[in-house]
Amino acid sequence: MEAFSDGVFAIAITLLILEIKVPPHAGDHLWSDLGHQWPSYAAYVVSFLVIGIMWVNHHTLFSYVVRVDRTLMFLNLLLLMTVAAIPWPAGLMAEYLREDNASHVAAAVYSGLMVVMALNFQALWWHVTRTGHLFDDRVDVTAARATRARFALGSLAYPATVLLAFVSAPLTLAAHGVLALYYGFNQLRIPTRETV
Amino acid sequence: MEAFSDGVFAIAITLLILEIKVPPHAGDHLWSDLGHQWPSYAAYVVSFLVIGIMWVNHHTLFSYVVRVDRTLMFLNLLLLMTVAAIPWPAGLMAEYLREDNASHVAAAVYSGLMVVMALNFQALWWHVTRTGHLFDDRVDVTAARATRARFALGSLAYPATVLLAFVSAPLTLAAHGVLALYYGFNQLRIPTRETV
Amino acid sequence: MEAFSDGVFAIAITLLILEIKVPPHAGDHLWSDLGHQWPSYAAYVVSFLVIGIMWVNHHTLFSYVVRVDRTLMFLNLLLLMTVAAIPWPAGLMAEYLREDNASHVAAAVYSGLMVVMALNFQALWWHVTRTGHLFDDRVDVTAARATRARFALGSLAYPATVLLAFVSAPLTLAAHGVLALYYGFNQLRIPTRETV
Amino acid sequence: MEAFSDGVFAIAITLLILEIKVPPHAGDHLWSDLGHQWPSYAAYVVSFLVIGIMWVNHHTLFSYVVRVDRTLMFLNLLLLMTVAAIPWPAGLMAEYLREDNASHVAAAVYSGLMVVMALNFQALWWHVTRTGHLFDDRVDVTAARATRARFALGSLAYPATVLLAFVSAPLTLAAHGVLALYYGFNQLRIPTRETV
């Protein structure tokens, strides 16, 4: 399960580059055509961080999971479906970030997918902490359960980015970059018996 | 053999997103253009489930297989050839699901590939249970052989979807989603000596 | 080294499907448009077999290699460069197999790449049997060296397909399918001390 | 961490082939159209070597790293972001190498990415040798630190290729090929206690 998931993360993150196009027929104005494409680069960097950090957290969680039941298998498949979809809204952002109305739509779709991904990861964490027996013996299940409220609270930032999408699409993309970095430096900690 | 197969499953499932296009020149009607693309999203979700669940069953089977003969190697290569092809009929569905005559063609091709995949998996199961010695010692080979009739019967649903394709393409796609979920919740069980 | 190589094989084999296009604007003649694309399907099946069987032989070889020197690393990288390139001549075949002059060019390029791949695999085998110490202790190095002449002879079929390309492109593609199957059923055997 | 990184390297290297296009509507002049595409082939070969050799060095480094801290995780993610981006400047080179002004731009972008990649690898090496405790016990940390100056000096070749880009784009591409081969034959050596 984990090797398959790692594969999907690695492929999705590498496919992001296909959304940065080679400008056609640029002739003598290749520099300006490349500059004009800045939304592609921004969408690439932010989406790379988003998938990369999500992978780190997914990897941390699954390194403590030793049994997989059907619900977990199914929730994980849904999470992968969301992660693997990220190149598409990244492409939307790349295409429409510099347009007026369309930029808000693109940003809302991007943020919407992030909401679904965050909810999905929540559901996965909820299921693993609720059942308890899927965890490795090292894990302090009671302490893990206690993290749920704080963890859910942290995810409220994602619905907020949907609202932000209607204010400014570039700001929304920046916000997703900041959120990814925040979760990169405040990674999921699985409480173990030793640490309690 | 298994790491290679897992790689092909993971890549095929992640390439599906390339069939969801970024609408070009959408301008102010990006919302409606995105809505218009609903067949892409439906084909993505269903095909993701199909490949994901097939991977789970493939993985379960191969976790009990400890020897590989040439026939098994060859049957597995054919199965991977079918799985890796799924992004293409998924793209057909995405392109033609909203058209009249063409939608039936696209759905028939999609269903046809599913028939081939189901037959292939049957052949693989038949070969492994017939030879017996490819299995791990834990497996109850007699009981495994006894599952073949019931298993083959279950696969009759796939030819039925070819007929359904000529009635309604959206219904056909939905049927494949339901079949994937059904096999997700009624996964392949390999009878082991302890369970008999 | 082997996990990386397996990854490249798995990705190259799965990218082949991107060369089968969804016919655009097919309307009511989708069946005939799909039929018209038969070179795509043929190129997909043959190229899938070619990469799949090459992977089996590569995997067999490397399962007996326990040390990697720079030359082996470099020869392996060149082999992967050839394998990863196969989707491109497969696309050429798909595009030009039904045209007159262009079909010979496409078939010659396809066969040319197969010659390079066969030479590369020869060089790899030559290097590993010559040095000897890269092999696992199980391997009978003298017997392995003795296979080289017969093995090189077998590879003469590839230059012959370059000539065949100027006679008939469809026959050339069929020949590559037959060669892949031949090597699939007459796989590389590494002589071990027990078998001598 | 390492399996994920290996996956990204393997995918990025295999996606390079997508930058070699099948010439459309070539008719009877397919040979000359294929010849005309020589920049695609050159960019493919050089970029394949660049990613392949970088993978070898990355793999060597990580085979001596047994602990991962946040900084290392982050620096590695940035390095992967650079490696995964290579298909894009490779595509730029393929498209514009035969044009006059645009070729210098494409070559400068290619070289610029190589500078970023080299700096990134330097930062990774600096961090791992500075902290020391992330290394395996076999590693002679003092000797590893002593390599830093020489290692940094070697990387000065990359900024030089940015200047070369404004002289000649084909020469720049050739220089990157030579640099990759140089680093392939003078790989990163991690000093171990035994070798001191």
Image (spheres, coloured by chain):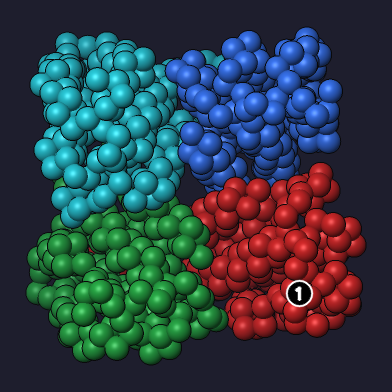
Chain colours: A green, B red, C blue, D cyan
Q: Say whether residue D87 is left or right of residue A106.
A: right
What is the quadrant of residue C165 in the picture?
top right
As drawn, A168 above or below D12: below
Seen at 44% across and 40% down, the residue is: D10
As drawn, C6 above or below A169: above
Determine if residue C42 is in view.
yes
Q: Say whether residue D81 is left or right of residue B129.
A: left
What is the quadrant of residue B21 in the picture?
bottom left
Q: Position of residue B5 (x, y in %)?
A: 62, 52
Determine if residue D26 is in view.
no
Seen at 81% across and 13% down, the residue is: C150
Q: Position of residue B9 (x, y in %)?
A: 57, 57
Query: SS for tag 1?
Result: loop
What is the quadrant of residue C168 in the picture?
top right
Residue nearest the observer in this picture, B163 or B194 = B194
Q: Say whether residue A53 is left or right of residue C183.
A: left
Name which residue type carries label 1.
Answer: Thr
Q: Which residue is under mark 1?
A: B192
Q: Say whether residue C1 is left or right of residue A181.
A: right
Q: Position of residue B70 (x, y in %)?
A: 81, 44
Q: Quadrant of the C terminus of chain B?
A: bottom right
Residue nearest the observer in this picture, D33 or C195 = C195
Which of the chains bears the disc numbered 1?
Answer: B
Seen at 72% across and 48% down, the residue is: B77
Q: Position of residue B128 (x, y in %)?
A: 82, 60
